Amino acid sequence: MQGSDAVELVRPDTLEEALAAKAERPGAVPLAGGTDVMVELNYDHRRPEALVDLTRIAELATWSASGGHVRLGAGVPYTRLIDELGDTLPGLAMASRTVGSPQIRNRGTVGGNLGAASPAGDTHPVLLAAGAEIEVASVRGARRIPADTFYTGVKRNALAPDELITAVHVPSAAVPAEQFSKVGTRNAMVIAVCSFALVLRDGHVGAAIGSAAPTPRRVPDAEAFLAAELPWGTDAPLPDSLKRRFGELVAAATEPIDDVRGTAEYRTHALGVLARRTLTWAWDDHRGSVRACA
Amino acid sequence: MTRSIERVAAVGTAPERVDGRAKVAGKAPYAYEHPVERPAYAHPIQATIAAGRVRGIDTARALAVDGVHTVLTPDNAPPLRRGQDAELEILQAPDVAFRGQIIGCVVADTPEAARHAADLVAVDYERRDHDVTLASDRPDLYRPGEVSHEADTEDGDVDAALAGAAARVEAEYRTARNHNNPLEPHTTVAVWDADGLTLYDSTQGVHSLRSAVAEVFDLDESRIRVLAPYVGGGFGSKGTAHAHVVLAALAAKRMSGRPVKLALTRQQTFTLAGYRTPTVQRVALGADTDGRIDALAVDVVEQTSRVKAFAEQTALPSRTMYAAPHRRTTHRMAALDVPVTSWMRAPGVCPGMFGPEVAMDELAERCGLDPIELRLRNEPDRDPETGKPYSTRNLAECLRGGARRFGWDARPAAPRQTRQGEWWIGTGVASSTYPVHHAPGSAARIERRADGRYHVGVGAVDIGTGAWTVLGQIAADALGVDREDVVVTVGDTALPFASVAGGSSGTTNWGSAIVAAAHGFRARFGDDDPPAGSEHTESAPENPDTERFAMHAFGAQFAEVHVSADTGEIRVPRLLGVFAAGRIVNPRLARSQFLGGMTMGLSMALHEEGVMDERLGMVVNHDLAEYHVATNADVPSVEAEWIDEHDPHVNPMGTKGIGEIGIVGTAAAVANAAYHATGVRVRELPVTADRFLTA
């Protein structure tokens, strides 16, 4: 590379250096696992002025749990999330298991998924449904962005040009009533045709769709319906009519397109199915916990 | 040393592939890896319009990149001989015949610089409206001159027979545009010196590639050497010369003696390495109340590139599959502004066994017959196409044996009968076939050397099939020595001529040459080990039986398919193929060929479709992230078996060829099983979840 087309590679050892670099070059693209960014560079879909390699910053690749939350560093690869947090963040671990191949899961991170903000990104519905907050930082300071307001458009997010994603804060599951489901056009290494996440917690319902609208998004009408109608605190089975209504409300909230992977009509239909399916599973988890307490 | 009389035949044993260790250790050099002195690297510049011409090319920014030596364009490229093969005659004119066509090339010190500079070349085009849409009702469809055999055939009165048939199926079936995607991309290393041109190329035929290159460069073949000792798959896409080989040779010519390396990117292979045309197949079957077929018609519409005609022989297999007094097959072509169509594993036969084999399933239902019984009732005594007897035809054995093994008898006759949880469950069957191809002229050289071993040289290519190994087994038996005493060398035009590794004919052609050479060697030097330096070269003789017999391999493909009642998602937990393909030289390697073919057939059934964006004239899913091939998780159980078939006519080894038959019929078996599961008949590939939404 040479001249004005050269891409500078910045390799900070600390977060402070990384934030300084990002402040200095707001056009710089952060690089974590590289599973999205390197593909885009390879196809020349983008040619940023600089890349900021975050893989040397040890603190980004750590997680901690306290006060019913997990703070998951932006650089923790999916493989570690699955291995180390499978019980604590079951929904996020489920979604992570469906990402790419083992090699991709060894490299890819939730932080990177958020940075790319693809409507089809696998972890987004879970982060939305769980009520996660995205911790971002710049030389100006740190802030937290609720997942609901993080996704602003197709492959766009709420980051300011000088900000980096440092972590996500996810409420941990006291009761593992979290489910994720995805339809793909083959059984592995597949981008979602559509995906759905559901989190049930103490009268709260979080539900979100992926790959069926310009951004991953929550489905408020379906959430409100379920929160009001679920027989919380009991181990009663759910009537089919309730599951069906929930599926209809989820399907009604989609705004899909036709593409190579599937038709809009199929996505809407399948999301209704995924909604009913995950509700059945999550409610089974809930009932199990009620019985365990009884 | 006199050879042991008790020597066990090597053919039929299952040694590991002799090149396996070198390959897994990274010591088997593929084309691009051949070390050459100070290589330069070429990167193609491709047209970004689908039809028109190049008005001007501005190469200034590209030439300014550090390490860039030259930019070849239609304005400055060395001349080629024209008029033979327009796919290869690149950079001779400004015309653009398809999006992605090579219109130039950057040569630089590094592949990165070449690729970067290629992006900086600014091209001014004069566009014309492109036409990339295949439709069976296009007014400009034409009959190709030939499709390896005659384009159209007709016996009896098909329309009258159909009109009077007690049971009738008439429907349109479609197969998708498929891309070969071998693991090793298409690569070439070109070196010009005083003696001529040397090419290290990822090819399926060193001699056939040499002929093509000699033609376009107007060189005597003796001045070209092609080497391809190891090739990482081809599936037909390396069976004919493609433009990038010419481009590498042109670039090396311009670099006056400096070697040039060129590797196509995965995306480039989608436009520059050939692909399988989509097909539209109008199939008509008419039968009597007993299910005996009276009329059979297959009318095919498919596409070809305007730049070079290639007619996929899609109706070919239906000419030989089943008896029927009234028969018609036709091929019609649409010439479009699309990349060049070419060979892909079992060209013609693979797509051509989709429509008819699904139609057979539909006919079985109309006749109230089991699909296997319908096929058995229509077994011909002789080849319906030629009237010749079959050298061997064991389709019935494959169907019956497979049915036993698969548990076919437990199957409910009607569709949509079995449900487990959310899954509808069904099973399906389809026949498989592939012709035994012979190509004349392959020769082998056998030399006893000072190491005490017999060195067998043949200009064959092992594209991952196991030729290195099986040719040694054949040579050992023909010479009457142990396999360890034979050393095989392939993949070099310095070796005796060999036909292309295509048409499942390698073992037939090269093995026949080796047997002839071995027998000639013994006739000349006696049965005892002769002195070192004793050498004999001989060609395979013509086989008169090829005129007397119809020669085909046959098989039966079974699939179990589960379809989600909720989402339409499709799972194929089980595939079984049973084949009658003559003698199996090496069961270990043969199994890989069958399983690989069946897996590719499953992939064709469920996943593979190059999606054309008609606005741009390009396949949009031109990479392996979006053009899906089956993954391990899609293929829980694939099993292949074969019957012990002895065919004395096909060749001295009794082999029929096994590289392609595994992919034939698989997609029909899957579609038929999906119907049996759900009652939803899918006549278009790939079979996708959205088709079952109503299920």
Image (tube, rainbow, N blue to C red):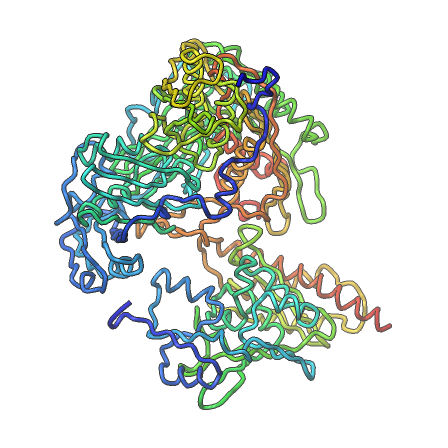
Q: Residue at x 36, y 49 (%)?
A: B619
Count of numbered tags: 0
Q: Locate residue B98 relative to residue B645 in the image: left or right.
A: left
Q: Is any atom of residue A95 visible in this view? A: yes
Question: Where residue B546 sits: x, y (%)?
Answer: 42, 13
Question: Where residue B533 sits: x, y (%)?
Answer: 38, 23
Q: Residue at x 57, y 45 (%)?
A: B692
Q: Residue at x 21, y 51 (%)?
A: B104
Residue in the foreground of this view, choosing between B463 and B269: B463
Q: Quadrant of residue B301?
A: top left
Q: Quadrant of residue A76?
A: bottom right
Q: Locate residue B526 relative to residue B7 in the image: left or right.
A: left
Q: Locate residue A249 relative to residue B224 in the image: left or right.
A: right
Residue in the foreground of this view, choosing between B597 and B142: B597
Q: Is residue B270 above or below residue B579?
A: below
Residue in the foreground of this view, choosing between B88 and B676: B88
Q: Locate residue B306 relative to residue B186 in the image: left or right.
A: left
Question: Where residue B695 sits: x, y (%)?
Answer: 61, 45
Question: Where residue A100 sits: x, y (%)?
Answer: 53, 58
